[in-house]
Each structure stands twice: as structure tokens, then as C-alpha cells.
Image (cartoon, grey):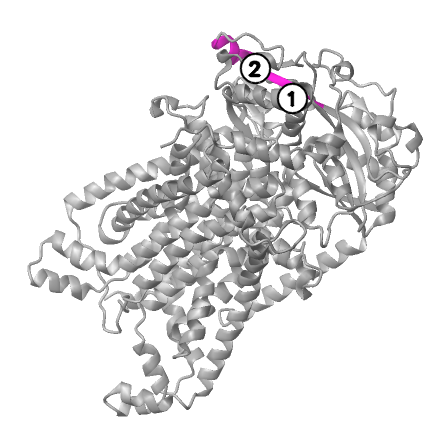
Amino acid sequence: MATETLILPDRAVAIAPLRQKLGRDDWIMRGAVVALGLWLIVTVLLPLWALLSKSFQATDGSFVGLANFQAYFANPALADSIWHSVWVSLLSTVICVLLAFVYAYGLTRTCMPGRWLFRIIAQIPILAPSLLPAISLVYLFGNQGLVKWMLFGASIYGPIGIVMGEVFWTFPHALIIITTALAISDARLYEAAEALRASPRRTFWTVTIPGARYGLISAVFVVFTLVITDFGVPKVIGGKFNVLATDIYKQVVGQQNFRMGAVVGLILLLPAALAFVVDQLMQRRQMALLSARAVPYDPRPDATIDRALLAICSLIAFAIMVILGVSFFASIATFWPYDLTPSFKNFDFDMMDGGGWRSYFNSLVMAGLTALFGTAVIFAGAYLVEKTPRFRAIRGFVQFLALLALAVPGLVLGLGYIFFFNNPANPLNFIYGTMAILVICTISHFYSVSHLTAVTALKQIDREFETVSASLRVPFWRTFMRVTLPVCLPAVLDIAMYLFVNAMTTVSAVVFIYAPHTTLAAIAVLNMDDAGDVAPAAAMAMVVFATAAVTRAIYMLLTQGYLARAQMWRKR
Amino acid sequence: MNLCTTSDLRCAVVSIAAAMFCLSTAARAADLTVYTALEADQIKPYKAAFEKANPGINILWVRDSTGIITAKLLAEKANPKADVVMGLAATSLMLLQKEGMLMPYAPAGLDKVDAKMRDPAASPQWVGMDVWASAFCVNTVESSKKNLPEPASWADLTKPVYQGQIAMPNPASSGTGFLMVSAWLQMFGWDGGWKYMDELHKNIAAYTHSGSKPCRQAAAGEYTIGLSFEYRANKTKKGGAPISIVLPKEGLGWDMEAIGIMKTAKESEAAKKLADWAATPEANKLYAENFAIVALPGIASSMEFIQGDIDKMLIKNDFAWAAENRDKILAEWSKRYDGKSEPKN
């Protein structure tokens, strides 16, 4: 961009002649976008390609076309999984997004008491591996369940358990996106609505919902793909109810049938890709909400609404606390359910599967490195994709790659990493079996949600900031450091925490690529549950949770003062 | 990297340097990567005893269920990470043998190993360690609550009274599950075996991933009967679980835990030392603490809660047949039982 912009009244006219001449900033930004694209090609696209090419190969590597797909659909049990996956994911998504929206509304748009506490409780599910809710649900509703009667004879092993577990596990993921969307809104719109005497209901449907639309759609997209690609919950509580994600695991792990795993992976990519396309189409309509002249919205007390939301939020928060509490209780019981005296017997991880306490320390290192490098790459990447002028085709492609990771189930990504990085012909082969590959894989696995969080935050900054800076001949990185980064700081720190916590809790992507000296805590939970050591699995899940919770608490204490200062400008 | 302040950067550099240092020191020691399906509570004493006898060699275990370990080994075929495979089902090792992934090696003292428990070649590609066999764990508290008779045979398990009471390992992932299915198909014949499983399937509440889990679930009362194996049954009962252990009277399915060296082993000298050690009386004494039958004849075992002579109850097992037909059996099994019982919505 150039200074002429300010002089000429019509910007369209000004930009046209500039097409031929790119400034230094443009070249740097374009170079960085290309570098990011290459990074994503190596860490997402090529492993995926390595895996997908397997789906068209026979055991000996020869090309067999669609033969593997024919074999898949010839097996009725496998074909059923598609329908199972779709309806369970749809149901979980609807329930989760509705609950998360109401909860987010309570947090951002009402004056209900204890919002800070609700905010903290809502983060609990994200601090634990997805196996934890499933384990707790078994303790609550299983054959020896504490409140088994609540299911009226229905079995928790199957769709009921999966939906309950997935809603719990995906709730904070949806909440983060919706809260970000609801948190920043232009009070002028509400003032205008009031001045025009619009009813609260009308204001809700014509101002609030459209304002949060992008967040809601993103949340639906994210939750649906998270559920359909998660295998932690159905693994523990799915019983004989097969879904696509557990099929991949069974095909690959049980039958050593990598081609069939790749086939299921491809099928799993379809609904995720569809969700992705829909999201992209809707996103085109999104405009910057927070213009340079926007005024932040401050909720006013309203006894009825505040009380209603307090009741609903309390119920949700209570359910979350119960699920956490049950795992805690089970982890300190000596021999559930026959001897409930407290003991630390279940914390003697060194005598159980999963690599013992060493796994836990490995997880700490892995999560720290992932948070550090992941946040830098992802936020800078989102900035480049959003703010690089023109360069549409490449930016679109990089954006596609950044979101593609979300559609790739962790298991598929992990298997792809084996095929791609364990190939001796690959010059990157040396990272196989190291901590580095776990970090890279985890960054790729959680790239999309972090990217969406960053994009959602960035989209709310009016492009005029850049235009004005450019016209003042301020280099883009200075605008980035002085305006973009401080404005987006909450999102940046959230991304770092999100990556840290997910790296602590993830199982699916890393389960195929950990090495003997890089076992991880969450995988230990899976392995212990698999071996039937359910109480120690709950204990390890609680240790992971406690770590994530303490980290989060320290982070909140350290950043609260700073954030309050940095975000002061939003207040009137 | 715009996000890093100076101190962040320094911290990153320090941690990378530390990580690289760790990696380089780890690479210098004689680290032997051993893939295993041994139980987590077994591998500690094995490792300690081996490392004591062979100072300077450090075992790095990669432990998982039989299915996962086999899957991992096959997935990594192009660039194997394992030096040795130890304590994996012989049927799985035969699969690796078929793929040409194992190195023929005659460990010291091979002549003393029971001839039935090794690859018959002069330089065997795998050598057995011990035998593990099926057993039921029956929760006594729950079965008296529900007035269930104690099953004594495989046939008993198909009685309608046990509907929804039984957990069994999924043969696709669990070696313990596979040896049961393989045993039924050999005892009752191909058609008879599947007919039996059709009947049994009606009573199965859950197919688990691991062979230990059904016994532990029975111990926790989640299901009344867990089809598992004798080591886990003995150990679980020793841990205080209210279970009784049943050896089905028609005969026990079984497989061998065996050891083999990868053709691509980077630490091949250390690998051979482990193979040598695995055939010593010392090692076999350790196996005998966990299993009734070990590779060296004449080493007495002590499993305090197992009643009956396991040796005599083992079925006649054709490993070559089982390894040869593993894919076919598992495909048929999953077609018949994997999720099919779920009511259609």
C-alpha cells in the first residue's frame, strides 16, 4: 500500500496502478506466506498424501484402484459405522453448541453473579484427556455405576455414552470460539436498536445472533469435526457401537490393515471436508465487526435474564464438576467398588502400562515446546494469511491447509507421519522417533482451532488499521507488534494455553509415533484403560488435569494484571 | 518469531540445546530397543536381571498389546526401529518371519530349549519363552448376587443365563483373544467354531482391546465373567479381587511368548546377548514366576491361585495354521461380530 491512498478519494482507483509495483513489506509478507505454506505442506499435506496413496495400494504396494473401497463397503459392520458416526456427531454438535452458546451468553452478555467462577469451571474439560469423561461416565452409569438408575435400564456403553462424553469434551472448544465472537460487539448497534424501540427478542435475533454468526458456524464446524474424528470417548465407552474413528484404530491396530485404515480415513475426511466447504462459503459474508470506531458493549443487570442464565449455567457447571469429581474419587479408592478406603495405590504408575511417571515428564516437555513454537507459527501464520495484501490464490491455499488439519483425524495424521517420516528416502527421516516429531505432529493436529481463534480475533480488527499504518509508511511488523499483537493478546495467550493443554491431553495423533523414550501421559491413560487398569488410568488423567489446571491458574494470575492494562482501551 | 521477547528466545535456545544434548547422550549408550507385549508388571524384573548380567546395555521397552506391537512392526517395515522383539505371540513372530523381517540366530543354550517351543530351523528366527493360556475370571460377589452358576467349560458360556455377563478380548487387537478364537476353530472345526462363536456372541457384553481387561472388569464387577489368561487371573486374585479362576474343561487355547532379533537391528551384538539371556535358566526362572510352562523343561512354576494341570489341558495347537490364516480369521470375526449386535435405529 502506498501514500497515494490518502490523497485519492477513491481507493479502487488508487490500488489498480499499484498492482505492478510491490513494496518491500509485500515481498517479505509474501515470502513468509510461502514459507508457511511449505511448512504446512510438509507437516500436513505430504503425510496425508503418503497415507491416502496407501488406500489405493495392495499389500505389496501395487496400485489396485478402488479395490480396498469395495472391500470396505462389502463389510456391513464397517459400512454401518458411517451412519453411526454421522448421527452421533450431529447430535453431539447440536447439544454442545446450544449449551455453549447459552453459557457464553451468560458469561459475556449478562450480569449474573460468579461469572469468573463459571468461566473457570467451563475450562475443566479441556484440561483433561478425552478419556477422562468416558471413564467417569462408566463409574457413574456403568454396571456398577453410582447413578445407573438414571438411565432407566439403557446402557451407557454406546451412543448415549458417546454423546455425553463428546459434549463434555468439546464444550470448552465451542465455548472459546463463541465467547470470542460474543465478547467483542459494537455497543452502538444495541444503542441504535434501543433508540428504534426494538424488542429485546428482536435485538437478539437481529443484532446478537448475526454478530455471533461467524463464531457459531465455526463452533459447529469445529465441534462436528472434533466429534467425528475423536476416538478417545468411543474407545472407552462405545461398547459395540462402532464409529469411523474406532474403526481406523481397529483396522490398523488390530488387523494391521493399513490400507483399510487409510480407506476409513478417506471416508472420514468427507463429512469433515463438507463442513469445511460450508464454513468457507459462510465465511465470505463475514465482515469486520470491530471497526476502528466501534464502542464496546457493557451488559446491564436484568434480574430475569440474569437469574435464568445463572440457573442454566449452574446446572452445566455442576455436571462438569461431577464428572471431574467421580474420576478423582475413583482414582483414590483402593479397589473400586469393593474397597473404597482412600489410598495412593493407583498412582504407582511405574508398575503399570504406559511408561510410568516418565511419561508424565515427557508430556510436560512436549507440551511446553508445542506451546512455544506452535503459538509463534500459528499466530504469525494467521496474521500473514489475513493481512497480506492480495496474493489471493496462495493465501487461499495456505488458509485451506491451515484448516485442513482440523479435518484430519489424529489417527490418520499419526499414521501418515509413520508412512511419510519413517520412509528412509525422506531427508526428514532423522526426526522420526524424537520429541521433535511429537511436537510437530501436535502443532499440526491442533493447528486449525488455534488458527481459527487467531483469525476470529484478527477479523475483528478493521483493515483500516493496516491501511492507515501503511499510508504512514510504518512497516507491517511494527503495526503487528504495536497494534495487532496487543489487541489480539488475549487470543494469543489463549492459543498458547490451548496448545499446552491439548499437547498434555492428546492421544490420537501421537499414539502411533511415540518412541520408548518419548511415551506420554495421556497415552498412558489410554494404555492403562485398555489393559483394564481403569482406576490408575483415572489417576493419571487426574494428574494430567491437575498439571494443566495449575499451569492455567499460574497463567491467569500472571497475566490478569497485564491483560487488564493491555485491554483497557476497549473500555469506554 | 515476532512474538518472542529476548528472554523467550534465550529460553527456547536453551531448551533446544538441552533437548539435543539429551538426544546425543542417549544415542551414545548401548540402548537396545525392544518391542514387547509382555505385561507392564512383568518387564521390570526382566529388565533388571538382564541389565545386571550385561552391564552397559540398556533396554528401552516399547510395550503394547500384541495387535499394536505387530501393527507397529509392520508399519515400520521400511525403516524398523526395533532391535529385538521379545515376549510377542509366536503367531505374530511367524508373520514377521513370513515378511522376512527376522534374523536367524541360535542363542547359546538353544539345545536345552523344548523342541516344541522354537522355530525348528537350525538357526531359528524365533525362540519361545513361555506358554500363556486362556482362563475365566468369575466375580463371586456378582454371581451370587445374580444367582449365576459357575461356568466350567466353554460350552457353559453359551447358556442363556449368562446373557450380557461376559467380556472377552477382541482377537483383532489382543493376542489372548486370538488364541481363544484359534483354539475354538481348531477344537470344534472351522464351521463348528464359528457356530460356537455365534452362540457365545449372544452372551458377550463387551469385546475389549486387551486380554487383561476382561479379568480386571470381572474383578471390578463391571461384568461377571471375564475371558482372559491365567497370569492375569492369578495376579488379579492376588491383588484382592473377589474372583474365582476357571480353566475350561474342553481344553485351553494357548500361544507362546517368544523372542526374535530384527534383521535390521542396529545393536545386533546387544540384541544377540538378550536372545542368549532369554534362553538361560535365570530368565526362565523369572518367566516361571508368571507362567506354568516355560521354554526350559524342569523349571517349576508357582501360581498360587491356579488349580489344575495347565500342561495337560492345552489343546493341540497348530501355530503354522494359525499364523497362515490369521488375516482370514480376523476378517471373518470382524464381519460377524464387530458391532453387528447393535440394534438398528
Q: What x and y, as percent, mark residue A562?
A: 40, 62
Q: Which residue is mark 1?
A: B184
Q: Could you say whether the residue bearing mark 1 is in a helix, strand or loop?
A: helix
Say which label, 1 or 2, has the lower sequence index.
2
Placement of the C terminus of chain A among the 4 image quadrants: bottom left
Identified at 52% across, 59% down, the residue is A444
Q: Which residues are magenta?
A: B133-146
Q: Quadrant of residue B28?
A: bottom right
Q: Nearer the viewer, residue B337 or A512?
A: B337
Identified at 80% across, 19% down, the residue is B301
State whether residue A362 is above or below residue B281.
below
Identify the mark at residue B145; answer none if there is no mark: none
Q: Which residue is mark 2?
A: B157
Q: What x and y, as percent, mark residue A370?
A: 55, 58
Task: Check disc 1: other Cα within 10 Å, few if <14, some if 14-19, many if 20+.
Answer: many
Task: Check disc 2: other Cα within 10 Å, few if <14, some if 14-19, many if 20+.
Answer: many
